[in-house]
Image (cartoon, rainbow, N blue to C red):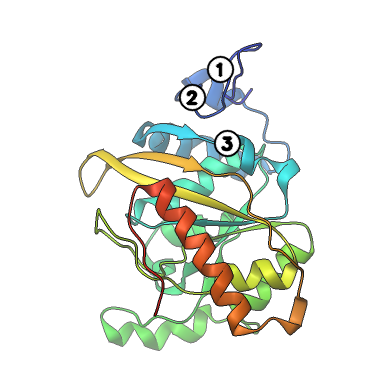
């Protein structure tokens, strides 16, 4: 079974307080009924390699499958999170994916492209590749629909979506970037809550950081405004979301004037 315990059972009063790294036996016996053999093997193998990089995890109860659909919005401290979080969530959600928005150019990295595809990532085409000549390959990864419309379709079908609103890795230990409005817009248009998340670097190094992760309680939009959403609606909701991410990550954040 997954290592989520309460006082009355195998794990602690709070899912965060009681979290510990799964043992090898637990990793390879955790039921992942929503995944095929290849994806079960990949998820367990990634867990074996990556879960030791988390020193603590709090609030897992907020991202379990009975909370679907939701928009998970977190700060972005290292590239490591883009690989580790989808695997961690699949493990604790019994194989149910959270579909993260991810930059297209990382699919060209051997191994990462495979992980993107198996985790159900929603590829975002906005950024330019480095070096620039690799942009010639961009059409190979393009999708007929925009990333926003694909994410919205997942939410309306009852599946959850993950976003790093800062839009890029932010290594400033004190301040969050102002962020993009996509998470707020998706939440309003689909009428689903936002689960805020905070990631703190508590040790390790740039290549293998030690992370503390906390998921906050769901934040419900005041109204489902669907396609009538205005920029003012989105901006106000975005400000609330980023303020909560700042609290959970121990960083400061200031809205756009």
Mark linked to residue 60: 3
Label 2: state its secondary structure: loop
10 Å neighbourhood of mark 2: few (<14), some, or many (≥20)?
Answer: some
Q: Quadrant of the N terminus?
A: top right
Q: Which one is in front, 246 or 12?
A: 246
Residue corresponding to mark 2? 17
In this image, 254 relative to 13: left or right? Answer: left
Among numbered discs 2 and 3, the one appearing first in the sequence: 2
Q: Which one is in front, 125 or 137?
A: 125
Among numbered discs 2 and 1, the one appearing first in the sequence: 1
Among numbered discs 3 and 1, the one appearing first in the sequence: 1
**Is 105 situated above or below 72?**
below
Where residue 66 appears, as percent x and y from the top left, is 75, 41
- Contact (Cβ within 8 Å) of mark 2 with mark 3: no
Where residue 96 appears, as percent x and y from the top left, is 68, 46
**Is 94 situated above or below 105?**
above
Residue corresponding to mark 1? 12
Label 3: state its secondary structure: helix
Q: Quadrant of the C terminus?
A: bottom left
- Contact (Cβ within 8 Å) of mark 3 with mark 1: no
How many angstroms separate mark 2 from mark 1 (CA)? 7 Å
Q: Residue at 46% x, 59% y: name it.
A: 243
How many angstroms separate mark 3 from mark 1 (CA)? 12 Å
Evaluate whether residue 190 shows in this view.
yes
- Contact (Cβ within 8 Å) of mark 2 with mark 1: yes
Task: Say which quarter of the image contains residue 63.
Answer: top right
């Amino acid at each position: 079974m997954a290592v989520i315990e309460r006082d009355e059972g195998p794990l602690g009063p709070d899912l965060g307080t009681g979290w510990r790294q799964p043992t090898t036996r637990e990793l390879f016996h955790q039921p992942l009924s929503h995944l095929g053999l290849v994806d079960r093997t990949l998820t367990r193998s990634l867990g074996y390699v990556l879960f030791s990089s988390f020193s603590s995890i709090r609030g897992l109860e907020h991202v379990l499958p009975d909370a679907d659909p939701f928009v998970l919005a977190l700060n972005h401290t290292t590239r490591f999170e883009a690989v580790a979080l989808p695997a961690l969530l699949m493990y604790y959600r019994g194989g149910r994916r959270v579909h993260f928005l991810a930059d297209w150019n990382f699919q060209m990295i051997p191994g990462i492209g495979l992980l993107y595809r198996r985790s159900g990532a929603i590829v975002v085409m906005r950024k330019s590749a480095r070096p620039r000549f690799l942009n010639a390959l961009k059409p190979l990864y393009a999708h007929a629909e925009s990333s926003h419309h694909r994410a919205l379709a997942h939410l309306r079908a009852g599946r959850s979506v993950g976003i790093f609103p800062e839009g890029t890795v932010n290594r400033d230990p004190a301040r969050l970037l102002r962020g993009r409005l996509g998470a707020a817009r998706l939440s309003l248009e689909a009428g689903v809550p936002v689960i805020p998340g905070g990631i703190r670097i508590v040790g390790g190094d740039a290549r293998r950081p030690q992370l503390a992760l906390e998921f906050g309680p769901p934040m419900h939009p005041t109204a489902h405004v669907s396609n009538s959403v205005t920029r003012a609606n989105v901006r106000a909701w975005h400000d609330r979301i980023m303020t909560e991410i700042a609290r959970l990550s121990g960083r400061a954040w200031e809205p756009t004037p």
